[in-house]
Amino acid sequence: MSLRWAKVARTELEEAVQWYEAQMPGLGDKLVAEILTASALIEQFPAAWHPLSIHARSHRLNRFPFCLIYTYKAEDDIRIVALAHQHRRPSY
């Protein structure tokens, strides 16, 4: 199974980590840890979260106000396309 990140999603992740680190040292690391946990769950159960379209889904993080938006056509081809902030861009 292969989970890849789109370039724009990586940029959104880097910006979010920097912002949280500026708020409190170590908080960016906690965001990354939660995203790694969510990514592993998506990789294991890609059809388990809220469908946005026939091939796109959204997995909401628990502690942080973000969703991982991902696409998959087969379980071996999963791509994170966005790290969407739920308050700044609720209909992203």
Image (cartoon, rainbow, N blue to C red):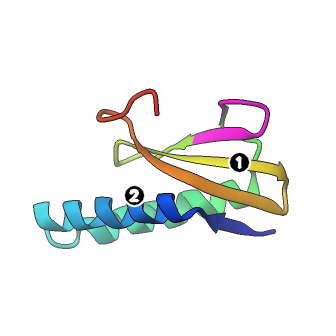
Q: Residue furthest top?
A: 91
Where is 19 relative to 63, above or below?
A: below
Name which residue type carries label 1. Thr
Image quadrant in which the N terminus is located: bottom right
Q: Residue at x 58, y 62 (%)?
A: 6
- Give the residue at mark 1: 71
- Height in image: 49 above or below 63? above
Judging depth in this view, the residue of 13 and 29 nearest the camera is 13
Residue 2 versus residue 84 in the image, above or below:
below
Q: Secondary structure at mark 1?
A: strand
Name the residue rendered at 41%, 64% in the picture.
Answer: 11
Give the residue type that dot 2 points to.
Glu
Q: Circle 1: is it few (<14), some (14-19), or many (20+) Cα within 10 Å?
A: many
Looking at the image, residue 10 sits to the left or right of residue 65; the answer is: right
Q: Position of residue 49 (x, y in %)?
A: 66, 38
- Residue range highlighted in magenta: 51-58
Q: Tell me, for residue 85, which label it has, or none.
A: none
Residue 32 placed where, x, y %?
40, 67
The image quadrant that residue 66 belongs to is top left
As drawn, the label of residue 12 is 2
In this picture, residue 13 sits left or right of residue 79: left
